[in-house]
């Protein structure tokens, strides 16, 4: 089973649109996983039918028992995250600020603070509207995005692919370079970076490639909005060559992406022959590369 | 001495768990007394980060001198090394009894840090 | 006045709005722009600076004095992040797991733990006219995004004027940290399914935080008014509508400030600034 992560570093490069389209092209040969769990979007194109739904518990939050509280204030004093404040005469925990470190719980002489598990989100195993397996999740508002939910989605998607003997896992990865990105790299065979021909795209690509090197994964690149800034595109191509990242496709800036997104269609459901061919070529290239390795 | 084997359950017939940090539990055998104990590790199966260090702490606390495992992650590995606990890595798939027997026969190879 | 610019969805034009708003405001007053998208900070790309000052950002990690330590194991027990392991005659600290909560230090019965530091990234302060730009940049591989957002915000304090915060994408911890001190939040959205979905998530988030907010519709196209309709249905003010135009896309792609290069876009941002000023409880110089 080959694990292909579609990443971007910068948001808005077209990563999710491309990942969704690759999932359509791969068809029954791929399980798709939406690991961009913070403000997840892929389900808006895939319109999934949930087969399984699971709660996701992660971290803890401090809860004060006001019957036992003596008002000594040590919790407020020692909280390093500013999560305990005074309202009227009471000490109040802000659940959106609480890190779950339990220092207040340990220091409270009255034993008035309990640590409670947090229901941080949920994850689903679904069939998308094309009938193919799709594993996805929703991270709750204000939750720590430690990568744990990403790991869960990946682990479930991997075991599903193995159980069903499906040869590919396509991961729609999170933006940035933090823990969620690191979690989506776990066990990855191939990272497909979707960047854009802009100064910001180039800047963010550099940081992402530094991270990819760390994981020693194969990486290739798609330059989207390729005709937006020729200088940036040239810089990206030079950078990729210097770092051993193969540029496998360049896609011109096109309203097709926006049009498709407007009605919740994937690129493969538009009339844009050029871009659809490019997506097909990208998938064929990935398959060839992965089959040979 | 005491040997720990990552386990999917508390039984000689249980399969080895193929992970260390996120193993379901650790099956511990005292080679002299033949007594066995089981350390539940389920809290670490689902934890975000630090499963390896926490699992390694449990193994250290149990007074173990040798770990027989499929793999061990870098953080857990560094803990076991610092604690002077030997690791026989690359051991897969077998039931606990099977892995233990092969160890007794001397047919498992030392591979140092378990990688 | 503290104004955060957020979006939920990445790529809607949050940085375009924050940088151009900062530029336009700096033409008449002192402005500070904080780039809090510390994993991929981009604001700096749009400004020529007169000089930069970089400072390393450090977070506390525990240092154990082995002579005072009794190897009791309390530090490892209280650590929620499994960042400490106690051996019979040693204590191991894993800096990358440490969340700097000080729990071990507080609970050690021997007082054997003191403060050490790990580097998690840097902040860079630069000047461009009347604009002070403060960028936070996370070191690759460091799990400390939220902490760095907080520290970047506190790096420089402006006595008066406008403070703008360019928030990271999403609705998780780092975004909460970025907007929590703001007097007003500008939400940048785009008329697509993704844009609308994430706008709604951000609106829910800001309602929980009790923050006032308004919406900027970027890449607006004729015939698609889903964001306007959503705002109308939810009594949310639309502050500005920026049309989807190739010239805007190209200049942004080149790292240019469109409020400077395209006059009618500059006028749009002036209008936005006036609207925001009229929302401010303070008098802005």
Image (cartoon, rainbow, N blue to C red):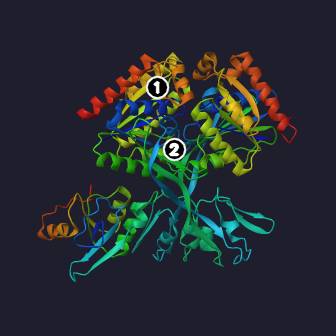
Image quadrant containing the C terminus of chain A: top left
Q: Quadrant of residue B17?
A: bottom left
Q: Is residue C142 left or right of residue C255?
A: left
The chain holding disc 2 is C
The residue under the point 33% across, 36% down is A28
Residue A161 point in image, percent of width and height? 32, 45
The residue under the point 25% across, 76% down is B29
Nearest to the observer: residue A221 or residue C25:
A221
Whether discs 1 and 2 lie on one chain: the answer is no
Return the residue at label 1.
Answer: A267
Image quadrant containing the N terminus of chain A: top left
Judged from the image, the secondary structure of the residue bearing numbered disc 2 is loop
Residue A57 point in image, percent of width and height? 51, 59
Q: Which mark is residue C139?
A: 2
Q: Quadrant of residue C103?
A: bottom right
Judged from the image, the secondary structure of the residue bearing numbered disc 1 is helix
Nearest to the observer: residue C49 or residue A126:
A126
């Amino acid at each position: 089973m080959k694990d292909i992560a579609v990443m971007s570093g910068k948001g808005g490069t077209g990563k999710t649109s491309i990942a969704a389209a690759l999932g359509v092209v791969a068809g029954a040969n791929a399980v798709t996983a939406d690991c961009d769990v913070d403000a997840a979007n892929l389900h808006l194109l895939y319109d999934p039918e949930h087969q399984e739904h699971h709660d996701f518990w992660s971290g803890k939050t401090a809860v004060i028992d006001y019957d036992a509280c003596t008002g000594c204030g040590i919790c407020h004093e020692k909280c390093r995250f500013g999560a305990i404040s005074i309202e009227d005469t009471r000490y109040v925990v802000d659940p959106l600020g609480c890190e779950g470190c339990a220092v207040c719980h340990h220091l409270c002489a009255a034993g008035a603070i309990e640590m409670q598990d947090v229901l941080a989100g949920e994850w689903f195993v679904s069939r998308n509207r094309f009938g193919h397996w799709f594993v996805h999740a929703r991270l709750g508002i204000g939750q720590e995005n430690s990568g744990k939910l990403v790991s869960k989605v990946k682990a479930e998607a991997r075991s599903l692919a193995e159980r069903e003997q499906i040869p590919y896992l396509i991961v729609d990865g999170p933006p940035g370079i933090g823990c969620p990105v690191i979690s989506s790299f776990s066990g990855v065979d191939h990272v497909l970076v979707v960047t854009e021909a802009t100064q910001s795209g180039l800047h963010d690509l550099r940081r992402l490639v530094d991270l990819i090197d760390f994981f020693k994964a194969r990486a290739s690149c798609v330059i989207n909005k390729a005709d937006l800034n020729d200088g940036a595109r040239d810089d990206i191509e030079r950078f990729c060559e210097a770092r051993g990242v193969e540029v496998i496709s360049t896609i011109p800036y096109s309203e097709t992406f926006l049009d498709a997104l407007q009605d919740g269609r994937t690129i493969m459901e538009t009339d844009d022959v050029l871009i659809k061919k490019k997506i097909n070529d990208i998938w064929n290239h990935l398959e060839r590369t992965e089959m040979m390795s | 001495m005491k040997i720990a084997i990552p386990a999917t359950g508390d039984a000689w017939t249980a399969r080895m768990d193929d992970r260390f940090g996120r193993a379901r539990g650790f099956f511990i055998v005292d080679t002299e007394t033949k007594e066995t104990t089981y350390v539940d590790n389920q809290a670490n199966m689902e934890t975000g980060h630090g499963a390896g260090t926490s699992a390694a702490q449990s193994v250290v606390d149990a007074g173990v001198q040798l770990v027989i495992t499929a793999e061990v992650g870098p953080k857990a590995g560094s803990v076991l090394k610092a604690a002077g606990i030997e690791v026989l890595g690359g051991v897969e798939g077998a039931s606990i009894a099977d892995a233990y027997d092969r160890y007794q026969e001397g047919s498992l190879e030392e591979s140092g840090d378990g990688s | 006045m503290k104004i955060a610019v957020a979006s939920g969805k990445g790529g809607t034009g949050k940085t375009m709005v924050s940088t151009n708003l900062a530029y336009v405001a700096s033409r008449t007053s002192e402005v500070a722009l904080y780039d809090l998208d510390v994993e991929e900070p981009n604001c700096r790309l749009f400004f020529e600076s007169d000089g930069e000052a970089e400072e390393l950002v450090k977070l506390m990690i525990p240092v154990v004095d082995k002579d005072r330590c009794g190897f009791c194991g309390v530090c490892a027990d209280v650590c929620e992040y499994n960042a400490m392991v106690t051996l019979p005659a040693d204590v191991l600290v894993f800096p990358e797991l440490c969340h700097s909560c000080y729990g071990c230090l507080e609970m050690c019965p021997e007082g054997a733990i003191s403060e050490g530091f790990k580097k998690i990234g840097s902040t860079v302060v630069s000047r461009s006219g009347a604009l002070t730009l403060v960028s936070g940049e996370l070191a690759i591989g460091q799990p400390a995004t939220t902490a760095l957002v907080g520290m970047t915000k506190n790096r420089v304090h402006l006595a008066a004027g406008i403070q703008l915060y360019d928030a990271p994408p999403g609705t998780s911890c780092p975004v909460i940290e970025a907007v929590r001190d703001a007097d007003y939040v500008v939400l940048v959205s785009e008329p697509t399914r993704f844009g609308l979905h994430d706008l709604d998530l951000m609106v829910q988030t800001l309602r929980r935080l009790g923050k006032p907010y308004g919406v900027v519709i970027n890449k607006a196209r004729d015939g698609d008014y889903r964001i306007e309709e959503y705002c109308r249905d939810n009594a949310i003010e639309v502050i500005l509508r920026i049309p989807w135009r190739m010239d805007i896309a190209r200049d942004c792609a080149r790292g240019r400030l469109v409020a400077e290069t395209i006059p009618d876009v500059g006028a749009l941002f002036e209008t936005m600034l006036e609207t925001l000023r009229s929302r401010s409880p303070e008098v802005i110089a």
